[in-house]
Amino acid sequence: MSTWLVEKCKPLADFVNDIKAKGLYSYFTELEQTGTYIKVEGNTLVNFSSNDYLGLTHDPRVIAEAKKALDTYGSGLCGSRYVVGTTIEHVKLEEKIAAWKGKESCIVFTTGYQTLLGTISALLVKADDSIEDNIVLAIDKLSHACILDGCALSVGTHMTRGSSKMLDGQIRYFRHNDPGSLDSIVKSSTNKGKNVIIIVEGVYSMDGDICHLPEFVKIAEKYDACIAIDDAHGTGVLGKTGRGTAEHYGLEEHIDLLMGTFSKALGCVGGFVTGQKDVISHIKHKARSFMFSAAPPVSNIVSVSKIIDIIQSEPEHLQNLRQNETYFKDHLKRLGFNYGQSATPIVPIIIGDSEKTMYLSKKLFADGVLMLPMVYPAVAKGEERLRCTISAKHSKADLDKALEVLEAEGRKIGVI
């Protein structure tokens, strides 16, 4: 094996080994059972680290649909959507999501990450494969990796067989959730004759705060900019009926592109983008992560479809989620914990120290609670936290159990 490759990788490996030696490593836990209650080495724990906000992944009706699809379509489709990977169930789900989100058209990707990667980069390519050089991508400084990577692909080398071209789109970062900062960027870009695509997240996954969408929409309309939302953590969670961040603000008709994932409240794997039909058609035929990836299995597709049906017909799941979120946050506040600007079931319990954060996670684990730590470089130094997520399926006893351990151990190490 190459010696330089080993030396290159050794520093991070040494860091991981040191954390493991201290008994503080919490990642890649091997699960024997999943859901609101997980099993590790025969022990059952309450799961506070899942994005299954509505707790529908194990709903018997969802599992029954998946089993029927397995019998009909098998375990996978072994081809891209372009070849043998589009079934009637894929098309039905796309039509259902478009109607649910109030848009003309939709396409479904294999993962949420690929959705952002493919959609953003496709918008920088013209129909004739020439390169669009007149677009600025305006993104939040704290954007998720899939947005950052989609933008990087867009302005990096666009490879085709036998050639490579440079995409000349420009990335501009505005201060987190700051309308003034965004306005300045969009104004200066349009004054230079550029078209602007504003890309924001509905809910920011590390802090649980909601984007200032009304102000961003005003800026987009003021300068004739396109506005796109990645509503991964808003779909199924925000809005009167759970349609997401745009519904939460009453702005669904003002959004050009609405993207999301199936791996949060929709309980599966995959992603989608909705919008005007011609725009979606362009993305469908230019998004490389869509064109060159295997299609999602039908068992996954019909599971998502059933979960959307349940969300639409049974509002009690969303009501339970909001009640649990309020109860948990009220008690955290009483105890003196800092959960930042969270306005969603993503509850960052900010500790501000790596070892104390990992210590709390280990103590919670020992007492039957899974709540994983987020430390540098996943977050900035001083922002280390337990990333806690609340589920509609958590009982009051589950919430109290986590709170009791947090209080006892937090006092021991001087966090509260």
Image (cartoon, rainbow, N blue to C red):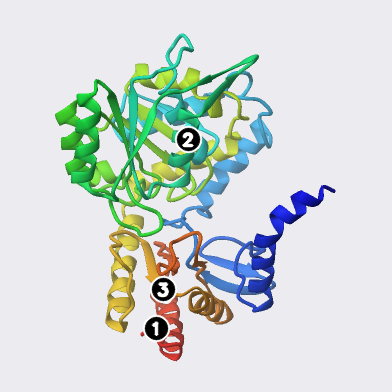
Name the residue furthest right. Answer: 1
Q: On the image, numbered disc 1 is attached to which residue?
A: 415
Amino acid residing under circle 2? Ala
- Mark 2 or mark 1: which is in front? 2
Q: Residues within 10 Å of mark 1 (few under 14, many from 20)?
A: some
Pick whichever, 293 or 328, lies toward us. 293
Residue behind mark 2 = 152
Which dot, 1 or 3, sits closer to the camera?
3
Rounded to the nearest whole Å, what is the CA distance between mark 2 and mark 1? 39 Å
**Residue sitting nearer the eye, 267 or 147:** 147
- Regarding mark 2 in the picture, which secondary structure is present there? helix
Answer whether labels 2 and 1 touch (C-beta < 8 Å): no
Which image quadrant for residue 326? bottom left
**Label 3 to label 2: alpha-carbon separation:** 30 Å
For the C terminus, which image quadrant? bottom left
In the image, is residue 403 above or below residue 308? below
N-term mark: 1 or 3: 3
Residue 98, percent from left and from top: 36, 29
Residue found at x 34% / y 73%: 328
Identify which residue is drawn at 46% across, 75% down.
353
Q: Residue at x 44, y 66 (%)?
A: 381
Residue type at the position of mark 3: Gly
Q: Is residue 98 left or right of residue 58?
A: left
**How many residues crowd around disc 2 within 10 Å: few (fewer than 14), some, or many (20 or more)?**
some
- Residue 305 placement (x, y as % from top left): 46, 38
Mark 1–mark 3 CB contact (< 8 Å): no
Q: Earlier in the sequence, mark 2 or mark 1?
A: 2
Q: Is residue 124 above or below residue 389?
A: above
Give the labeled residue for mark 3: 352
Q: CA distance from mark 1 to mark 3?
A: 9 Å
